Amino acid sequence: MMRGAIVLMTLAGLLGACGDTTGPSSVDAPGFDRRAAGVDQRIVGERLMSSGEYELALEAFQRAAIDDGLTAELLSAMGVANLQLGRLDQAIELFEQATIKEPKWPGLLNNLGVAVMQKGDYQRAALIFKKAVALDNGENDSIRKNLVLALEKSEKNIYTALEIETQQVEMEIQDPKRDTQFP
């Protein structure tokens, strides 16, 4: 009998604990409000870029493009993310698409120039930086510095190519039998 009373009290305690759980003391997660405004994925992408999470930032920018379309700003942001990930070809392609939409944006041209320079095309990069400097009236220090660097590397490449060609010619002069055929 005593045992039955203990079981009955235990069941009563358990049933009391199973009462209404929808009140404010509930530990359940709140519901999802489908009418609420979503998070701006551009902001999410920018924050992820600042954190060095370039792959996640790229995904956030792609989600933003679903809502906003492929704007020059989003194309540029995706280009920067790809540039940081070392995907130079993709970055250049995205920057070029953005320049079609915004051909007079110096910062965008600077980004394109940086990607082109990293690919080793210093002459093309110098032309891009020249255009960016002109559009910016030479006010942006980093664009001017990038132009100077591209010109220096471009000249160095020209001199290196000339040195190689000169060395080849000198080798032929020193060894005239090399290309000479005797009967």
Image (spheres, rainbow, N blue to C red):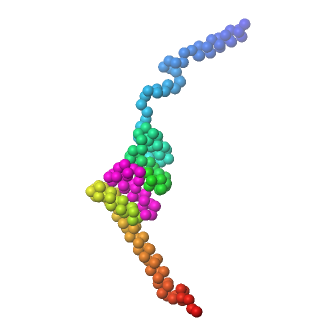
Quadrant containing the C terminus is bottom right
- 76 or 142: which is nearer to us? 76
The image shows a total of numbered marks equal to 0
Residue at screen point 43% across, 28% down: 36
Task: Determine whether 124 is above or below 50 in the image.
Answer: below
Point 65% across, 11% down: residue: 9
User: Residue 104: x and y, percent?
Assistant: 32, 52
Rendered image quadrant of residue 111: bottom left
Residue 72 location, x and y as percent? 38, 47
Between 87 and 11, the residue placed more toward the observer is 87
Task: Please give the name of the residue rendered at 46% of the width and 43% of the height, measured from the top-left corner.
Answer: 62
Task: List the single residue furthest toward the front.
Answer: 183
Residue 66 forms part of the magenta stretch: no
Give the magenta-colored segment's residue range.
96-121
Toward the bottom, the furthest residue is 183
Q: Position of residue 131 (x, y in %)?
A: 32, 59
| Residue 146: quadrant of the picture | bottom left
Q: In the picture provided, is 151 more to the left or to the right than 59?
A: left
Main secondary structure type of the part rendered in magenta: helix
Asked whether the viewer can see residue 84, the reply is: no
Depth check, front residue: 116 or 183:
183
- Would you place residue 94 above or below residue 69 in this image? below
Q: Quadrant of the N terminus?
A: top right
Residue 58: x and y in percent read 47, 46
In this view, the residue farthest toward the top is 1
**Residue 102 in view in this figure:** yes
Name the residue at 37% across, 67% down.
152
Please indicate whether residue 141 sits to the left or right of residue 5 in the image: left
